[in-house]
Amino acid sequence: MQIDDIEITTGVNAFQSASFENHDRTIEYETSKNLSYSDVISIKKGLDVVSEFYDVNAIAATTPIGICAVSLGKTLDEAVTNVMDSNPIDFISATIISSKEIDSDIAKMLKNTNIIAAPSFTKNAIEFMETHNICYITVKTPLKDYKKYLSNETIETPMGRLIQSPNLSELNQDSFKVVTKTKPTVEQIEDAVFAWKVAKHVQSRAIVVAKDLKTTAIAQGLQSASVEFALDYSCDMSKEAILASDLPLTVHDINVAAQGRIGLVILPSVSKDIVIAADKFNMGIITTGFTNILY
């Protein structure tokens, strides 16, 4: 189904109207079915985060509410399995975004999901998805160019129209600093960069716990206790894992992270008491020099 043929007739709720309008920054894609308002939101969230990892095997599971799980893998099969293990409940009926081509074996692993989006699909994968009535989307615009298509973020309010530029932030070597006595390993730094990039696309007050290039917990949009929530979910998988936060943390948060046996924290900035607390637990801290809040 070509872009011009796509129709959205209702909004999130049946009593809300909605429409679909192309603009000068519309990416090129095709979909096998009409998409709902919520479908488009889920796909957009997935493309936002997967575009950060366009050159490797990456899988993201999303819903209209947010990102459920993200993983990189030596193979796409490994990335899918990791996402499934990371959040098995939300994986069912989630929207799945892939950075690489989907074959029939991967399609079979994803048969219980809501939508599958990828740069391409093999003929056998398409036959399987059509036989099982699975909605699939071919994203023809290269993911490496995806950020070029991001428009200003606009919110209409009774007070006026809010407009801000898209978040195109990247980690900078000059501001990326280890501020604790404990220094991270190369593997921990890789996990930290991965977790920070995921947190960039997670709703504000984001906490992302990650290890071996896969998320083990994502907390988002919570007013308080985000660290506790994420570590409770991650459970034993938090041992020697990375914790990424889009905002500065408190000493209490560091104490909670220590109880969860977190090995390294990456966050925008820290105060001296945070560094002292981390050093007490032989926990590493990396500061990025900037926040990545997403409301």
Image: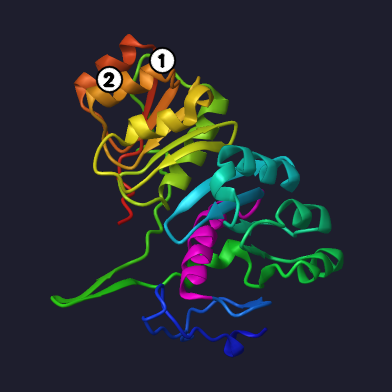
Q: Crowding at label 1, few (<14), some or many (≥20) Cα neighbours within 10 Å?
A: some
Q: In screen coordinates, is 236 left or right of 273?
A: right
Q: What residue is shown at x 44% (from left), y 86% (from top)?
A: 19
Instruction: Answer above or below: position of 119 versus 80.
Output: below
Look at mark 2 in the image and give the residue it sits on: 275
Q: Work out which residue is located at the far bottom of the displayed protein and give it.
A: 4
Quadrant into which the N terminus falls = bottom right
Residue 43 in the image, given as x and y percentages of width and height: 53, 65
Residue 207 in the image, given as x and y percentages of width and height: 38, 39
Look at mark 1 in the image and give the residue it sits on: 182
Q: What residue is shown at x 70% (from left), y 67% (from top)?
A: 134
The residue range painted magenta reads 36-56
Residue 181 in the image, given as x and y percentages of width and height: 36, 14
Q: What residue is shown at x 46% (from left), y 86% (from top)?
A: 21
Instruction: Please say whether residue 188 is one of the residues in the magenta stretch.
Output: no
Instruction: Answer above or below: position of 16 versus 177.
Output: below
What's the residue type where badge 1 is placed?
Answer: Thr
Q: What is the secondary structure assignment of the residue under circle 1?
A: loop
Dominant secondary-structure state across the stretch colored magenta: helix
Q: Crowding at label 2, few (<14), some or many (≥20) Cα neighbours within 10 Å?
A: some
Q: Nearer the viewer, residue 122 or 231?
A: 231
Q: What residue is shown at x 50% (from left), y 30% (from top)?
A: 189
Instruction: Please say whether residue 42 is one of the residues in the magenta stretch.
Output: yes
Q: Work out which residue is located at the far front of the displayed protein and give it.
A: 15
Q: Splitting the image into 4 quarters, where does residue 245 fall?
A: top left
Q: Nearer the viewer, residue 235 or 203?
A: 235
What's the residue type where badge 2 is placed?
Answer: Val
